[in-house]
Each structure stands twice: as C-alpha cells, then as structure tokens.
Amino acid sequence: MTVPRHVAIIMDGNGRWARERGLARIAGHEQGAESVRMVTEACVEMGVKFLTVYAFSTENWKRPAAEVAALWVLLEHFIAQETPTLMKNNVRLQTIGRLHELPESCQQALAETVAKTAGNTATTLVLALNYSGRTELVDAVRELGAEVAAGRLAVTAINAEEIAAHLYTRTMPDPDLLIRTSGEMRLSNFLLWQLSYTEIVVTEKLWPDFGKDDLRAAVAEFNKRQRRFGGL
Ligand code: IPE
Ligand code: IPE
Ligand code: MG
C-alpha cells in the first residue's frame, strides 16, 4: 500500500451534523475538532507526513458574527488543549492563510504552538485559517512583483517553480489525496494551485462523523487510482 505523503481535507458538514441533532451549529464545530484530533493521530500511525485541513476560508467571514467569534474561541481552546498531545505524538503545527486578520489572542496561541512544535518530525499538521487559494496567489504575485520592481528578479525567471516558492505552502509537497466530507463536489477556493494533480475522494460522511477508519478507507481508495500526470 502506498501511503500518501500529503493529505488535504475540506472538513465540511459540521452545521448539518448539528442541525440533524437539534443542536446549535457550534456544537458541530466542537465535534469537528474531535475529528481533527483523531485524523491527526491516524496520520501519525500511518506515516502521512503532511495533513492540511481547511478550517476557515476567507469567504467564511460572511457567516453570522456570532458563529465566526465562536470559531476563534474554539480554535484557541483546541490549541491550548492539543499542544501537549502534539508534543507527545511528535506532530509539528503550521498554518497557511492570512493569519494577521485573526483575533490577536488566536495569533499568539498559534505562534506559541508553532514555535514549540517546530522540531517535531512525525507529521506536520497544517491549519488553513483565513485561507483561500486566490488570496494565496494574490499574495504570491505581490511578492514576485515587488522582487521584479526591486530588480532582484527577471520577469523571464518567473516559472512554475518560482511561483510555488512564493506560495504559503513553499516548504510542503503538493497534496496526493484530497478528501471532502458531506458530499459536496467543489473545491471552495482550497489550494487551487497545489491540487492540480491530486486524487479526490468525496465522502457523504459529515466531518464530525469522520474518524480514523474513514481516513484509512480514503487511503485505500487512493491506492486504487492510477496517477498519470498527463503521461501514458
Ligand atoms: C465546515 O462545516 C466548517 C467550516 C466551514 C468552518 P460547515 O460549518 O460548513 O457545515 P455545513 O456545511 O453548514 O453543514
Ligand atoms: C469550505 O466549506 C471551507 C472550509 C471547510 C473551511 P464551506 O462550507 O465554507 O464551503 P461552501 O460554502 O459550501 O462552498
Ligand atoms: Mg459547509
């Protein structure tokens, strides 16, 4: 069996999970955090080196302010609670997205855990926060433009490698496997550049119901795929 080096997940369906139970949407997000914990552990067990989870998109600011605020509180609790487990399991935490627009206390909690776990080597858990593929490309183009303007980069030197080297994901391999829960068949602005040749698995399961066995099933499905990258 081939273990994907990098698994990316669009964690979707928290709200529907809560609604089905007559609960507030935030209860779905809380249970969703439990799924992140389990799936991270499964990645360590299986030897997946990178796990990137879409936790908050730049478009998610459109949601009611109360839900957005509750998500940041939940994130802070999650970081505080999980840091010892990340250390124990040798998991490194990283983030992608425009972090400077998050509440100050969230930024601080994240920065502390990122620094604390920087030397861990089993799995890198990447939280996509205030992330979108388009803003990532905008930020990369701004950096490239500034280097050109400063005379440090020739326009003709801009190629796919140079662009990839200016994305938030510059230190990570592209995802091998993308999982989206809750049956939605769309990318919702996630890793638009990096998913070019990624195998996609969509499951009907709602994210709070997604566990270790579901990750293993997705990896088994990935193993049935024939990746051609445009060749024969
Ligand atoms: C995914 O679950 C979590 C976030 C986007 C923060 P949703 O909150 O989108 O749940 P549904 O899609 O409304 O069920
Ligand atoms: C995608 O889920 C974003 C995250 C999982 C963080 P959404 O629920 O926001 O996506 P849409 O609106 O259904 O496309
Ligand atoms: Mg959704």
Image: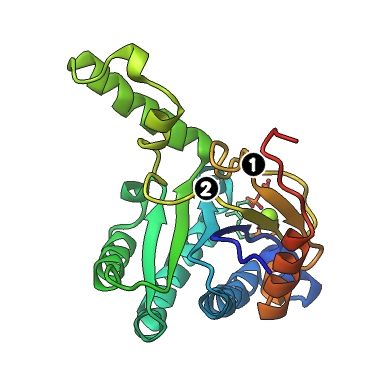
Quadrant housing residue 183:
bottom right
Left or right, residue 44 beside residue 221? left
Q: Is residue 222 above or below residue 76?
A: above
Q: Is residue 42 above or below residue 227?
A: below
Residue 56 rendering spot, x and y as whole percentages: 52, 54
Pointer 1 and pointer 2: residues touching (CB < 8 Å)? yes
Mark 2: few, some, or many residues within 10 Å (few <14, many ≥20)?
A: many
Q: Looking at the image, tell me whether mark 1 or mark 2 is earlier in sequence order.
A: 2
Please state if 179 lies on the left or on the right of 203 as rendered.
left
Does residue 210 appear anywhere in the picture? no
Q: Which quarter holds ligand 3?
A: bottom right
Q: Amino acid at mark 1?
A: Tyr
x and y percent of residue 131 in the render?
47, 46
In this rendering, is residue 215 above or below 111?
below
| Point 45% across, 66% down: residue | 125
Disc number for residue 174: 2
Q: Residue at x 38, y 79 (%)?
A: 90
- Image quarter hosting the C terminus: top right
- Label 1, on which residue? 197
Residue 111: quarter of image:
bottom left
Q: Identify the element where label 2 is drawn.
A: loop
Q: Amino acid at mark 2?
A: Asp
Q: How is the image coloured?
A: rainbow
Q: Point out the image quarter for the N terminus.
A: bottom right
Q: Tag on residue 14? A: none
Q: Within 10 angstroms of label 1, few (less than 14), some, or many (20 or more) residues?
A: some
**Residue 72 shows up from this direction:** yes
> Where residue 24 appears, x then y in whole percent?
66, 71
